[in-house]
Amino acid sequence: MNHKNESRVMIKAVCKDSTSLIIARLHCFFTFEQRIEPMTSLRLDHITHNAKRASGERLDSPKMADLLGSILSSMEKPPSAHDQESRRKAREQAARLKKMEEDEKRKKAEFRKKMEKEVSGFIQDSALRKKRYEPMSKIKRSILHDVAEVAGLASFSFGEDEENRYVMLFKKEFAPSDEELEAYRKGEEWDPQKAEERRRWKEQAALETEEASRAQKRPASPSSNYRDKYSHLIGTSAAKDAAHMLQANQSYGCVPVANKRDTRSIEEAMNEIRAKKRQKKDEEEGAGSSV
């Protein structure tokens, strides 16, 4: 609907309806007009003049002033030039951010596709056991770890600084040892031959330490035999011949162990002692009488 037709509609409304209905219809019209395009003062004056002329009221009448005041008070002011510039900049910034997000998403998808192709080639190459990549950003490392996990590979990140951190891939059947991972973490190159030498050296050191601990726990023993020590005095043969079982002298009351047992009772032993004393006493008395 063009501007002339809109004016005619409003004029008919002014001529036919009452004042309250006119105000309501004009309010709805201008509100709708404001949403489509900000109304200029020229168009507003044109519509107001036509409405007044159709209603037969003067331009400066109080009734018409109240009508126009009610309409104008319900309308929002058109945006200023500063607001329009701010909105334009905001739209441009939102468009730039959206474009940056789309570019970043596209780059990630391209990098993932590239890594999937390289990982597939690494798996198919039977001569390779591990693969080292150049230093890359954290986002790219995360994508590469994800691709390796899906492919069934072991992946590790090494490097002290964030800018120098890189990723290494290992096949499952050639998984790295703890010593190899420790060497990479220290920034050293892994040499299997040197690692084997270090392993043997550690084993030898462990054996020597164990032997030393056993020697400390072992009881002390003489370093030499006394016969060797005093061989210059007693000779080797004499010392060997003299080392025989000593025999007790029978004249000094050597009693066999079997004879040391006394099976008598106490009363029997006392009676025998008394009998021996009486016999000894009788012998002494007989010897005295004979003298």
Image: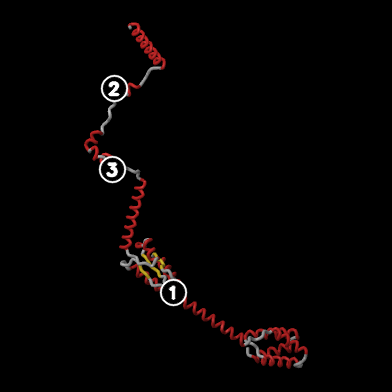
Give the numbered dot on residue 224.
3
Image quadrant where residue 161 sits: bottom left
Give the numbered dot on residue 251.
2
Disc 2 marks a residue whose amino acid type is Ser
Q: Residues within 10 Å of mark 3 (few under 14, many from 20)?
A: few
- Under circle 1, the secondary element is helix
Q: Position of residue 201 (x, y in %)?
A: 32, 58
| Residue appearing at x 36%, y 47% in the figure | 216
Disc 3 marks a residue whose amino acid type is Ser
Disc 1 marks a residue whose amino acid type is Ala
Viewer-closest of 25 and 111:
111
Viewer-closest of 8 and 259:
259
Tell how many labels.
3
- Under circle 2, the secondary element is helix
- Asked whether the viewer can see residue 261, the reply is yes
Give the numbered dot on residue 7.
none
Compared with 76, 219 (above or below) is above
| Between discs 1 and 3, the one toward the N terminus | 1
Viewer-closest of 234 and 125:
234
| Residue appearing at x 75%, y 84% in the figure | 20
Question: Furthest-top residue in view?
Answer: 289
| Between discs 2 and 1, the one toward the N terminus | 1
- The residue beneath circle 1 is 109
